[in-house]
Amino acid sequence: MANSPTTFRGEPAGPDGPDWDHAASLHRADDGGGVLGDFKAIRHGTIAELVALVMALPETDRSRYAVIKEGARQLTHKEIAELAARLDFPGRQE
């Protein structure tokens, strides 16, 4: 898949939907980001991997984390849950 920007609010970015293989990093939601934000990353991976990781946490802990897509697009815990609920999410649990 190409690493072009996509949308994450449930609407498809094109015929294939979100780019699940796009590079991203996991951060604490309150880490402040900024110019040196990448140094604060807890983990690096694809959007699909990091969404699955956050969703595997206890529900009470999920709001503590954010996924930052390469290119500085931050996904909140609510957006992460929306992605995990999509029918085309690679890690979807039935």
Image: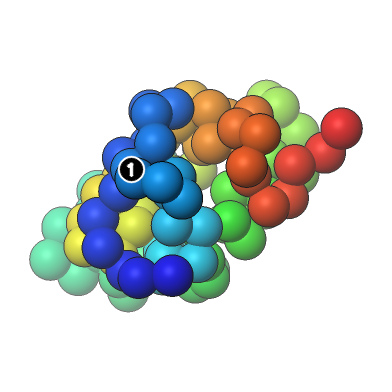
Q: Is residue 25 left or right of residue 36?
A: right
Expressed as whole percent of the image width and height from the top left, the position of residue 8 reads: 38, 37
Q: Identify the residue shown where x is 50% and y is 43%.
A: 65
Q: Pinpoint residue 81: horizontal percent, then vertical percent.
A: 57, 30
Residue appearing at x 44%, y 27% in the figure: 10
Left or right: residue 86 compared with residue 34:
right
Q: Would residue 42 be seen by someone viewing this image from the given angle?
A: no
Q: Residues within 10 Å of mark 1 (few under 14, many from 20)?
A: some
Secondary structure category for the residue under label 1: loop
Q: How many marks?
A: 1
| Most foreground residue, 46 or 13 | 13
Q: Nearer the viewer, residue 74 or 35?
A: 74
Report the side of 18 relative to 56 (left or right): left
Is residue 88 positioned above or below 69 on the image? above
Q: Is residue 27 above or below residue 87?
A: below
| 1 to 27, vertically: above or below | below
From the top left corner, tell me how far across and down residue 94 is, in percent. Answer: 87, 32
Tell me what residue is drawn at x 68 percent, y 52 percent: 90
* Amino acid type, residue under disc 1 in the picture: Ala
Quarter of the figure that contains the N terminus: bottom left
- Relative to 80, residue 70 above or below: below
- Which quarter of the picture shows residue 88? top right
Residue 17 sits in quarter:
top left
Residue under label 1? 13
